[in-house]
Image: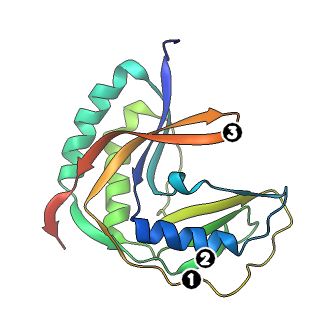
Amino acid sequence: MKNELHKRLFFAIPISNEIKNTCIEAQEGLPVDNKVKLVKPHNFHFTVLYLGNVLTEKIPELIEKAEKTIASSPTFTLEPEGVFLAPSKKPKMVWVKCPRNSIFSGLYKALKDELKDYFQTNEDRDPIPHITLARFKSGLEALPPPSPEFNVLEVKHIELWESKTLPTGAEYSSLHRFSLSSLKI
């Protein structure tokens, strides 16, 4: 087994089985062809912050810094609105989208500020909480109606996930679980 110098990392909110099942139901309405690539159900999640390649030796230090930041964030809820093409101008994905959320955005910004030494990004935007159901290059201009109804997700923890690119597609695994503050706003 080779020693990996870097790991591709991101912070994720895992989803409930109920939401996962509704996502699978939504995927079943999508066209099945070589233009549309469905995300595997075990990979469904909300991305909080994508870090990219991080030196493996720096991961324990990154976890320690993230622990303090995440523990100071209150628990919150995400309320999926339905299934949408994204981004809106030139769609390349199918999302389960939630309204913008101030606690989610605050957590994103706090992690981005605290961990700026571990990754490079110049994005400065208010993130949209979403689950990616599918990716496509072209050929999908409208979604088949109706969008299923989703349950609300109580967010009490987030996880640091590793992404590996395999011949069968991306595979995600959890490296560490962080609890949010028990306070709820």
Check the image and report above or below for 103 versus 47.
below
- Does the CB distance between marks 2 and 1 fall below 8 Å? yes
Furthest residue in direction bottom, as rendered: 146
Along the horizontal axis of the image, is 53 left or right of 93? left
Q: Which residue is mark 2?
A: 83
Label 1 Cα neighbours within 10 Å, binned few <14 / some 14-19 / many ≥20: some
Q: Measure the C-alpha gap from mark 2 to mark 3.
A: 25 Å
- Does the CB distance between marks 1 and 3 fall below 8 Å? no
User: Is residue 128 among what the camera can see?
Assistant: no
Disc 3 residue type?
Thr
Of circles 2 and 1, the one toward us is: 1
Q: Which residue is mark 1?
A: 148
Name the one closer to the observer, 167 or 69: 167
Q: Which mark identifies residue 168?
A: 3
Secondary structure, mark 2, is: strand
- Does the CB distance between marks 2 and 3 fall below 8 Å? no
Which corner quadrant of the image does residue 104 belong to? bottom left
Dot 2 or dot 1, earlier in sequence: 2
| Scheme by which the image is coloured | rainbow
Secondary structure, mark 1, is: loop
Secondary structure, mark 3, is: loop
Furthest residue in direction left, as rendered: 183
Q: Measure the C-alpha gap from mark 2 to mark 1.
A: 8 Å
Check the image and report above or below for 17 versus 12.
below
Disc 1 residue type?
Pro
Name the one closer to the observer, 37 or 84: 37
